[in-house]
Amino acid sequence: MEMSIPIFGVLAVVLVCALPFLFILGIVWLIIAGMRGGSKQQSISTEETRMIQEMFMGLQRMEARVDALETILLDKMKKDDKA
């Protein structure tokens, strides 16, 4: 008589044995990625801060231009109404 091993039983045993190994490997990977990512995260944060400051300064210049255009248009409208 041929002895057959159920495939699901073998897979279950392999999975049960592999899970702790994968769990420990995952924790080690997270620790290493966290140690590397610290300096990377800081440089990204510095770059983002610089970009936000540039955007803010650009928006301030745009606001000043819009104010100047509004003044010019209002002055022109007043001259047209007087004439």
Image (cartoon, rainbow, N blue to C red):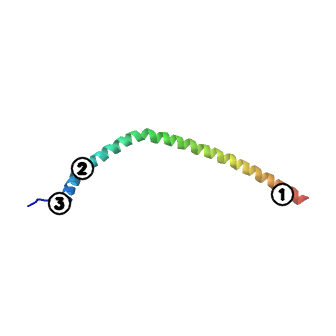
Which quadrant does the C terminus fall into? bottom right
The amino acid beneath tag 2 is Pro
Of residue 17 and residue 67, the one placed in the foreground of this image is 17
- How many residues crowd mark 1 within 10 Å: few (<14), some (14–19), many (20+)? few
Tell me where residue 42 appears, x and y as whole percent: 47, 40
Residue on which the image places disc 3: 6
Q: Which mark is residue 20?
A: 2
Marks 2 and 1, how far apart at CA:
78 Å
* Residue 14 higher or lower than 34, as above or below: below
Where residue 64 appears, x then y in whole percent?
A: 71, 48
Q: Which quadrant of the view contains residue 39?
A: top left
Query: Which percent across, then down, holds residue 6?
Result: 17, 60
Q: Secondary structure at mark 2?
A: helix
Q: Residue at x 85, y 57 (%)?
A: 78
* Dot 1: element: helix
Q: Quick one: SS at disc 3? A: loop
**Numbered badge on residue 77:** 1
C-alpha distance separating marks 3 and 1: 90 Å
In this orientation, which residue lies closer to the viewer: 40 or 18? 18
Which label lies toward us, 2 or 1? 2
Residue shown at 65%/48% (left/top)? Answer: 59
The kind of residue tagged 3 is Pro
* Residue drawn where x is 21% and y is 57% of the image: 12
Mark 2 vs 1, N-terminal side: 2
Quarter of the image where the N terminus is located: bottom left
Gap between marks 3 and 2, in whole Å? 23 Å
Q: In terms of sequence position, does the residue under pointer 3 or pointer 1 come before the other?
A: 3
Badge count: 3
